[in-house]
Amino acid sequence: MREQHPPTLQFLGATDTVTGSRYLVRSQDRRVLVDCGLFQGYKQLRERNRMPLHVNPASLDAVVLTHAHLDHTGYIPALVRDGFRGPVYATAGTTELCKLLLPDSGYLQEEEARYANQRGSSVHHPAVPLYTAEDAVRSLNSFRAQDFDSPFQTAGGIEVSFVPAGHILGAAQVRLKVGGRTVHFTGDLGRDNDPLMYPPRGLEPANVLVTESTYGNRTHPAGSPETELGEIITRVAKRQGVIMIAAFAVGRAETVLLHLSRLLAKGAIPAIPIYLNSPMAIDASDMYRRHREEHRIEQHEFEAMYKVAQPVRSPDDSKLLNLRGGPMIIISASGMLTGGRILHHLAAYGPDRRNAIILSGYQAGGTRGAYLAAGGKHVRVYGEDVGIQAEVIQMEGLSAHADSNELIQWMQSVPEAPSMTYITHGEPDASDALRLRIKHELGRRARVPEFMETVSLLDPR
């Protein structure tokens, strides 16, 4: 028999980084995990993925997901493999996207382990994946899709509600009613003026707020990202260069395609070949079509944006792009250059100063994208050092995260202050900057929790 436990919240991830979102809620003898993500970026963070979860997977009653990105979902296959037998609750959009993202994650990890063993480039002998594609496919049987704004009961009478968050298809804010308290998790909060997704729903009264802080210390550029993108493409095309757009396969790729479609319709960029080299992004288009209620795009424009790029599915066709040369545009994942097909293009075209690398939004510390955005000139790709002479542009305006001002405005939408706001999912400087703004501008209690810290939901401090 499990120990009876007063309502608590434990921060198992996303406390000193933007990745690894994992929050353990305990009440009585019940345990619910909100998000189950991978740590990404710096090696010391990625090594946490190999550590025990700090709670026995078999002891968890349920998992509740905010959205499909791997830093919020990518540990689920390992959780199920290691003994979790409960339901994974998510919106329909998140559930569908996880059917693409999780098996692909397992496949990429198998490929990386296989390559490391062939090259002898790992300190582990043999190198093994965190989980396999088969593990990921098996974990999908645990998913239970739920509607927005339809509260449901999970373990021990804990009530869960999904509230629209913008950001990407299916993204939700999560509200839990536990032990007579309401806990509100932002997940990744979208933007008011996102060209693709509707804005996030305003905050409703809650006793405890757990907010992301990815852009907690800065605001997005005032100019139009579409105009900036057009200027970059025109400039690079004139020098016969290749424009490599590193885009998250779900969400960011769609936004880039929308901007390109509009730019071409206005004659604002030259009509050079465009390739969407991401099978996942290609498949996601059907999901966006099925969930039109979640995004703002009219049918005619939605159809047009998927016609601007030639889809590339096979690995052989992907490799052929490296022989083609410019001018052309390649949209490929991953968005922070952590893996995927974009790395082959980076190795092929990165050394040529005629070309350009566009980083579409936030780059987590310790990733290749963050290194190049900071001016780095060499990256390691599949065991080889690649010198980068291509122009590197980080387009913060393409981000799907609310910035500091938008987060503050969103919090102001509810006049009744939470007893405590916990600031997570940000680099330390960003989280602390948002803490100060909440304290001084809103006059509310806020704190940045520590990794593995447990707080009381009855008396949050």
Image (tube, grey):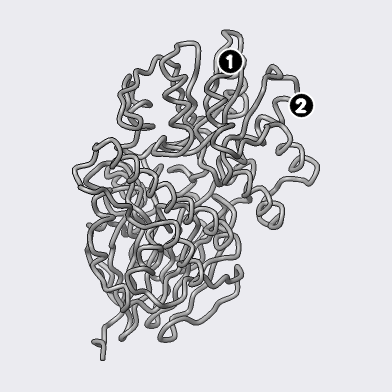
Q: In the rendered structure, which disc, 2 or 1, sits on the residue that comes first in sequence?
A: 2
Residues under numbered marks 2 and 1 in contact, where contact means CB atoms less than 8 Å apart = no
Q: Is residue 22 visible?
A: yes
Instruction: Check the image and report above or below for 368 versus 51.
Output: above
Give the residue drawn at x 50%, y 56%. Answer: 68
The secondary structure type at the circle numbered 2 is helix
Q: Is residue 440 visible?
A: no
| 67 sits to left or right of 336 | right
Instruction: Check the image and report above or below for 185 versus 152.
Output: above
**Rendering coords of residue 208 (x, y %):** 37, 67
Instruction: Check the image and report above or below for 302 versus 329.
Output: below
Front residue of this view, candidates 208 and 118: 118
Front residue of this view, candidates 206 and 122: 122
Give the residue drawn at x 48%, y 35%. Answer: 341
* Mark 2 neighbour density, 10 Å: few (under 14) some (14–19) many (20 or more): few
Furthest toward the bottom, the residue is 1
Q: Which residue is mark 2?
A: 265
**Rendering coords of residue 329 (x, y %):** 60, 24
**Rendering coords of residue 24 (x, y %):** 32, 69
Front residue of this view, candidates 40 and 316: 316
**Rendering coords of residue 362 (x, y %):** 43, 38
* Mark 1 neighbour density, 10 Å: few (under 14) some (14–19) many (20 or more): many
Q: Quadrant of residue 258?
A: top right
The secondary structure type at the circle numbered 1 is loop
